[in-house]
Image: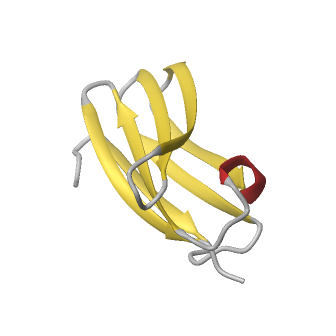
Amino acid sequence: MSSENINAKIYPNPFKDVFNLDYTTTIDSDIRIEIYDNSGKKISSIHKPNQSAGNYTETINSTEIGNQLAMFHIRIIAGSEVISKTVISGE
């Protein structure tokens, strides 16, 4: 998925203990970051209300999403726009 008003990258990917989600939004809006496991179950959600346009970094620790070797799907929602990214936990 792509969006005109939001862009994101995840690093390192694969990750061991922690990964960073860098995102940029060109509009002022509520931001939601939702993390899903590979079966589609939502396992974590971060809400950033009334965030101004700009560049941001969210650091996510593996303890927040379960210390398991897996693939995770990240949805970044800015207003009515959504982008998706995938991250893999490694050893």
Find residue 73 and report its image quarter: bottom left
Q: Nearer the viewer, residue 24 or 90?
A: 90
Q: Seen in the image, is 38 located left or right of residue 62?
A: left
Q: Nearer the viewer, residue 41 or 45?
A: 41
- From the image, which quarter does the N terminus lie in? bottom left
Indicate whether 38 appears above or below 64.
below
Residue at figure coordinates x 65%, y 51% from the top left = 65
Coordinates of residue 29 in the picture (x, y in percent):
40, 21
Coordinates of residue 59 in the picture (x, y in percent):
69, 51
Q: Residue furthest top?
A: 50
Residue at figure coordinates x 46%, y 29% from the top left = 31
Q: Residue furthest bottom?
A: 91
Q: Seen in the image, is 58 located left or right of residue 1?
A: right
Q: Seen in the image, is 7 located left or right of residue 49?
A: left
Q: What is the total number of numbered labels drawn onto the structure image?
A: 0
Q: Seen in the image, is 30 located left or right of residue 18?
A: left
Indicate whether 63 appears above or below 42.
below
Residue at figure coordinates x 49%, y 24% from the top left = 52
- From the image, which quarter does the C terminus lie in? bottom right
Indicate whether 1 appears above or below 79.
below
Coordinates of residue 28 in the picture (x, y in percent):
40, 22
Indicate whether 43 appears above or below 68.
above
Coordinates of residue 8 in the picture (x, y in percent):
43, 55
